[in-house]
Amino acid sequence: MFVFPRREVRSISKVIPEEGDLELRMKGSYEDTWKTVLESGSVECFYFHYPTYWEPQLNAHLQHCSSNGEQDKQNSSASLAMPLKSLSVGQEVKVILTASEDTNLEVKLRTQTCSEHLDVRLRFDLCGEEKTFLHKRKKVVAAGLKSVLQLEEDLLDHEVPVVAVMATGGGCRAMTSLYGQLSGLKKLGILDCITYISGTSGSTWTMSNLYEDSNWSQKDLERPILEAKKHMGKNKISTFSLEHLIYYQEELRQRAKEGISTSFNDLWAVALENILHDGVNDFKLSDQQQAVNQGQNPLPLYLALNVKENHISTFDFKEWCEFSPYEVGFLKYGAFIHSEDFGSEFFMGRLMKKNLESRICYLEALWSNILAVNLLDVWNKLSSTDESWQKLIRSKIRNIERNQIPPESSTYLGTSWMSPDGKLFQIIRNILTDRPLHHHIHNFLNGFHMHKDYYQESQFSTWKDSRLDQFPNQLTPSEEGICLVDAAYFINTSCPPLLRKERKVDVILSFDYSLDNPFQSIEQTSEYCLEQGIPFPRISLSEEDKKNPRECYLFVDEENNKSPIVLHFPLVNDTFQKFKEPGVERRQTEMAEGRVPLSGYCSPYQLMNFTYTKKDFDKLLKLTDYNIQNSRDFILQALSIAIEWKKCGRKCAQPCDSS
């Protein structure tokens, strides 16, 4: 999909015998400009990295300085424009610039082809580390399934289904609920049957906390739950005290010194760190590798949405970006880097400047970036009903035109920018689409260019998301930076990493934390997959289900078992009102504990509330724990179907008759 022939040019400059200010510039190169003061007789060496096909030009400008440091008024400078196309690889060319009678600049130029080694992995398949994890995890899952389903024989490797937990966003409500649901899975013995856990926004806060313990799923979850309850109950006013604001400012200043671009979103990151922890938490995403290196826990997958920083809405352009302890990458392009290199500078696939890996709080802020919204996003969100949302998606997602084949003489697809003229239009567009609080992150696809046949790549087409997919010069590789936001700007889901066909996920436990519409995200996901041609069951619900939702719904596409089996768990308070445990009714004096205020503006679980009382925290935790345990039969049924399908082979059209 990408083309990346690249070269570097080395320039050795020598000033004789007077001093001079030298500026070397190569537009389109990674370095762009070098500036230095050359002393009499000194020698300096400069490197420029550039794409071969750009046929760039090196511009040199020498400003002569007299002995007393003042610029000469006459004959004080000289310039050079050197087309590099004329240079053969390995050939050295010498050029002399005369800035004055006493000052000459001797420039030696040499080009060479860069190594073919790339630091960006350009493949759609899973990385080697994840494949190793899957091999180890399969043994744990096989043993877990045998125990929970009471199987008489061990499962063969090809009979072990891949089961995943999919958690949506929802701030502290999502964080608390996920703790409860994982606790319920642990009590049922099903946690060892899980291969992946994906999350976005608030659910990632639970995940990042759990994976600080390399054996968390093998232990009781009481300790991390008590820790979360402590932080949820503390007063958050001190988060923005003068003392903390001074610390935040110093933290951001230090990051800037390290060459890391900072923004208002970094303030959100350190404030979030203070909310979720007692102090600085030095844990990093790559540190989570210790929690999966033996397959002892499910592999965590985090999701964010890449959008345009300015001048376009999320509905017009969005791309899924996934994070794991091993890699960070774009699903659409099949481009991934090591997780510890996220935030470093890349050019044409090579790591040019290694920056320190950021603490995980900065990633948590990206995964829950609620600050980069623009007015057009807000309008779309407020004005969209389910039906209008689906129509909007249909109108925005385009099939890439197959008949617009570029000329064979070009290796790259020629495109042009198209935009209505007029200052009034530009002003209105800027007001609607500007993201005043976006966060600029180094783009690890910087310098890549799309091959003319990129749109024929099947996996790229699978994830086509906007009309801009027909215009490579408007896609992410052409951007210097990327802007990552909460996935809920498009769909409140973390499903996309699980729907990669390379992961072969058989069962998805869908945990939804919406208070208003418990089926919207799963319905939107189903509609999105239909548009994209991704196997996913249709979500069919009765009016009664929508009015009075139950704890669990099982969705199976019996005509296509390439589609995952989906168990959807809305955040509802149904039988929990009468039962404190499955099959154990509440006493009259315990009825108040079953009343969990999930609806209404006075609900303590609103998105922007970061402080829960101990009673509110415990109620939500126990509710979500109960809902999982009360759905045991649904879960076991889904696992049994998946195993039967695996035994038949993934190509059979119908589930096998288990009788």
Image (cartoon, rainbow, N blue to C red):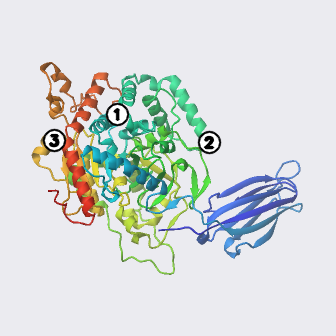
Q: Are marks 3 and 1 in contact (CB under 8 Å)?
A: no
Which label belongs to residue 549? 3
- SS at mark 3 in the image: loop
Q: Residue furthest bottom?
A: 408
Residue 179 visible, this angle: yes
Residue under the image location 30 percent in, 34 percent down: 180
Image position of 654 with respect to 220: above or below: below
Which label belongs to residue 258? 2
Tally the marks: 3
Comparing marks 2 and 3, which lies closer to the viewer?
Answer: 3
Q: Give the quarter of the figure containing the C terminus.
A: bottom left
Residue 541, given in percent of the width and then of the height, sits at: 14, 50
Residue 658, given in percent of the width and then of the height, sits at: 17, 56
Image position of 557 with respect to 265: above or below: below
Residue 291, given in percent of the width and then of the height, sits at: 46, 42
- First-in-chain label (2 vs 3): 2
Residue 384, given in percent of the width and then of the height, sits at: 24, 49
Residue under the image location 24 percent in, 45 percent down: 150
Neighbours of disc 2 within 10 Å: few (<14), some (14-19), many (20+): few
In-front residue for pair 523/155: 155
Label 1 sits on residue: 172
Q: Which amino acid does label 1 sit on?
A: Cys
